Amino acid sequence: MALNKFRTKSPWILHYNAGSCNGCDIEILACLAPKYDIERFGMINTGNPKQSDIMLVTGPVTKRSRERLVDIYSQMPEPKVVIACGSCGCSGGVFRGMYNCEGGIDQYIPVDVYVPGCGCRPEQIIAGVVEALAILEKKTKDMEGSVKLHNDPIEQDGQTNRREVAAVI
Amino acid sequence: MSTQYNIPVGAQHISLLEPLHFKFTTENEKIIKTEANVGYVHRGIEQACCSKFKFRQVSFVVGRVCGLCSISHTTCYSQVAEKLLKLDIPKRAKYLRMLVIELDRIHSHLLCLSHVAENSGFEALFMKTMRHREFSMELLEAVCGNRIQYDFSIIGGVARDLRTDVAQSILDKFKIFRPQLDELVDIYKTNWSLSLKNKGIGVLSKEDAIRLNVVGPFARASGLGVDVRNETEELLPWKEVGFEIITDTAGDVHARNMVRLKEIYVSMKIIENIINGLPEGDLISDTKAFPEGEAVNRIEAPRGELFYYAKGNKTQVLERLKIKAPTFSNIPAMVETFTNNEYASVPAIIGSYDPCLSCTSR
Amino acid sequence: MNRIETSFENLKKDIAAFYKPQAHHFITMNGVDLGNDVIEYQWFFCDYAFPSDITMFVTRANVDVQVPSIKNIIVSAWLPEAELVDLLGVNIEDTQKGFVLELDSETAPLRKK
């Protein structure tokens, strides 16, 4: 479909702050600004999870923001890529072990690219996003690939039983 | 009576950098009631500072309270710890602390101004302000070694010296930046389409500012001249380096923009005075004592008054550390100022508050 | 720093007599656990004209005693009060739990174990 072709070339970004110190968030904002200019890779920042392909998450997940994180992640359409920005997003960082922190985004949602640093530099964020583009392309290809069935559907009591059938990609 | 609608904004929204939840009750597009939920970023830093970290490590931990004003947090904690240790710091260290605080204020104010422009729907001005802001990030990297999270102030002084070539490059870049700032002031002041979203929107009167104990540029735009730099001389000699207070009377979004822009001029003047009159001497003074007793300290962060209370008990670990961030004082006024504004003006008003939620809930 | 000792009975009266909205800035309210279930409550004020004078109202009480609220004297005091209810697990007049902590968070994290 034509839509998929364009999506690999211009992915849209969703940014969510799951309890970080704002440091990585202003560096993401600096990426959108003219000096680093992430838009030359065809990316724009969008506020709508239903139109996004790449999710940039910062911060150790605090107990109040974890539901929103999972909620926003589940609203994004497949294929999607998650980037954890900053030391505290990767592992909890300095906040690891504090009583209201969960210690990293991968405790709740699968993370594809980790961007280290406190705070992570714009160059690092751009490198992470470019890596995410390759992952997004691979995921798209996997989804579009032909699906082979494990077993043939069986006739049982005059009906077709597909319960035992599993698809491999 | 017409129908009332409840409109939620947040926790994730394009106009918010941070998780913050507002619930607006509107009637004919007018907001009549606001509820705010500001506790999304609570991490438990105060408890960790009093149990997990030793008092010399805490100055690096409190920098992670907020990425925008981390130098204010580390300096304020260092000063309160020096009061507990009864330690005097060298004069050169004081001047270098003021230099980085003012550079940080320039980048924070420009970020806030660009955020207001973006939320008002003026995307080109957002890009222009962000482009002019990059020079302050480069200077901060040259002075401190990192773009954000400087870890510049430590207990007893500062961690790095100011090299002469870096000092010269600050003065050179200011020469380039000053005409750019003049151009920005002209746009923010006279642009007609921006004034539709900014003038007369989100007004906080002086009486309300006094009643609700507002601090920072938010209060100064309403005519309440409260600035910690104007008040204390004992720890950082602000008057000596040419500080002057900026106030406005209108109290709307436009007045807050103007106060921030004029404060950038004052910050540039302070930095030039510091570089031209930087005293010689040590960077750090040390002691083997342990913190004892209790002390309070206040400092002017980019968003207003930052307050620390610390209590020590002659061990490596503090007994209590209380952080009162500027936005924490402003939230009661923020919630009230939305009333009688149109719902379409909400993003611009939120941007003009310059809220810092990671400071507020820590 | 001026330290004024007060008690829960006199707190509202003392603060109402001291606080002039035109002259004083309410900074914040704080609580310190002194051990043995005794909590020291502090209210900080500063003067607009003489700002280096910070006035601190201090009182001590057991954890179970209800703390009087100063919301009707100083409107913006609801925020520090709501925070202290969560972080110290104390009982303040007209203040609900749940400002920063979730249901499965540690209760009263700033209290001594």
Image: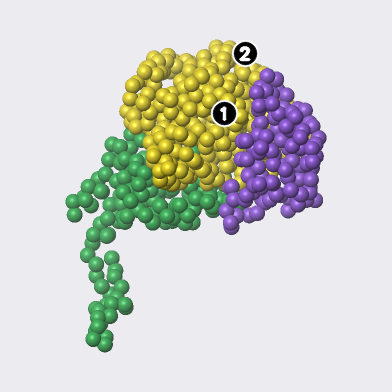
Chain colours: A green, B yellow, C purple
- The residue under label 1 is B208
Where disc 2 sits, the SS reads helix
Would residue A17 be seen by someone viewing this image from the given angle? no
Seen from the viewer's position, the closer of residues C45 and B137 is: C45
Seen from the viewer's position, the closer of residues A37 and B281 is: A37
- Which quadrant of the rendered structure holds the N terminus of chain B? top left
Residue at 71 percent of width and 29 percent of height: C19
**In x, y percent, where is residue B337?**
50, 33
**In x, y percent, where is residue A99?**
61, 51
Q: Are marks 1 and 2 in contact (CB under 8 Å)?
A: no
Q: Are marks 1 and 2 on the same chain?
A: yes
The quarter of the displayed image where residue A127 is located: top left
Taking the view exactly as shown, the residue that stands out farthest to the bottom is A157
The quarter of the displayed image where residue A44 is located: top left
Residue B50 relative to residue A14: left or right: right
Seen from the viewer's position, the closer of residues A49 and B294 is: A49
Number of marks in picture:
2
